[in-house]
Image (cartoon, rainbow, N blue to C red):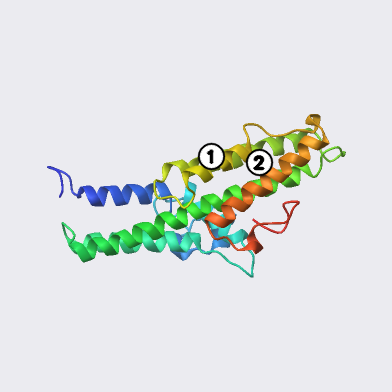
Amino acid sequence: EAADGDPFTSLEHGWDEAFGYFGAATAYGDRSVSEIAASRAVDRNGDGAIDLLRECDFGASVNAGKRDHGSADAAPTNFAAQAFLAFRTGRTIISDAGGALDADQMAALTEQRDLAIGAWEAAIAATVVHYINDVLGDMGDFDTAAYDHDAFLNHAKHWSEMKGFAMMFQFNPRSPLGRDQFVQLHTLLGDAPVLPAAGAGAADDYRASLREARGILAAAYAFDAANIGDDAGQGGW
């Protein structure tokens, strides 16, 4: 029920807040994933300004579009559309109920919640795979002229993105990635990037760990092999 003075119920507030954290503009569903990946903001009505509610995507919604855009033609993903449709469908269920939901409405809403969270988290997992592949690619330039200062900075960025996104799984109590898998994942990723100074043996060991970590995510989220990448981090997200 709505609290005194509030124009919304606690359920409406919670659902809308979750949608806000996802970060999609109200016109998100009208944009292709290539458009989302290319630019988070589009002046759709041509008024010379960006409406932050209707014309600008933020955070997780942009990330989902990027992963869909980068998925293989043979195994396209649909994280962005699944999450957006689930949020909209769930909000319609809440609005149509006009108050407390009955058992059937709650079951339908729970289904949409799970679809939204599932797509959102899968996009995060795909992003960890993406940055694992970037790190593998960076390490492929070790002991060559290509691994210069700028390459080191890119390597540091890619590793940090990989580790940061991988921390998120712990916050979903219903995550497909179980507690033991989460611990194993972070044991494999380690606490710092392996650099050329560590030696060829350490670099090879860490590459193997990254591939194993990538495999854990692929299994937990049922990712198609076409999106995972090869031993060098090529050909996937």
Mark 2 residue crowding within 10 angstroms, few (<14) / some (14–19) / many (20+): many
Residue in view at x 40 percent, y 57 percent: 116
Could you tell me residue 141's position as x and y percent?
81, 42
Q: Which numbered marker is on residue 231?
A: none
Q: Earlier in the sequence, mark 2 or mark 1?
A: 2
Could you tell me residue 177's position as x and y percent?
49, 49
Q: Residue flagged by tag 2: what amino acid is it?
A: His
Q: Residue flagged by tag 1: what amino acid is it?
A: Val
Residue in view at x 31 percent, y 59 percent: 110
**Cβ atoms at labels 2 and 1 below 8 Å apart:** no
Q: Nearer the viewer, residue 70 or 189?
A: 189
Residue 141 lies left or right of residue 179; in this view the side is right
The residue tagged with tag 2: helix, strand or loop?
Answer: helix
When the figure is inspected, residue 1 is found, relative to residue 148, above or below; the finding is below
Residue in view at x 39 percent, y 64 percent: 85
Residue 68 lies left or right of residue 144; in this view the side is left
Q: Which numbered marker is on residue 158?
A: 2
Question: Looking at this rendering, what residue extends furthest in the left direction?
Answer: 4
Residue 49 lies left or right of residue 229; in this view the side is left
When the figure is inspected, residue 65 is found, relative to residue 158, above or below; the finding is below
State whether residue 72 appears in this view: yes
Mark 1 residue crowding within 10 angstroms, few (<14) / some (14–19) / many (20+): few
Could you tell me residue 64's position as x and y percent?
52, 55
Q: Nearer the viewer, residue 122 or 94?
A: 122
State whether residue 47 appears in this view: no
Residue in view at x 51 percent, y 39 percent: 167
Cα separation, mark 2 vs mark 1, equals 21 Å
Q: Which numbered marker is on residue 183?
A: 1
Which picture quadrant has residue 71? bottom right
Question: Looking at this rendering, what residue extends furthest in the front direction?
Answer: 180
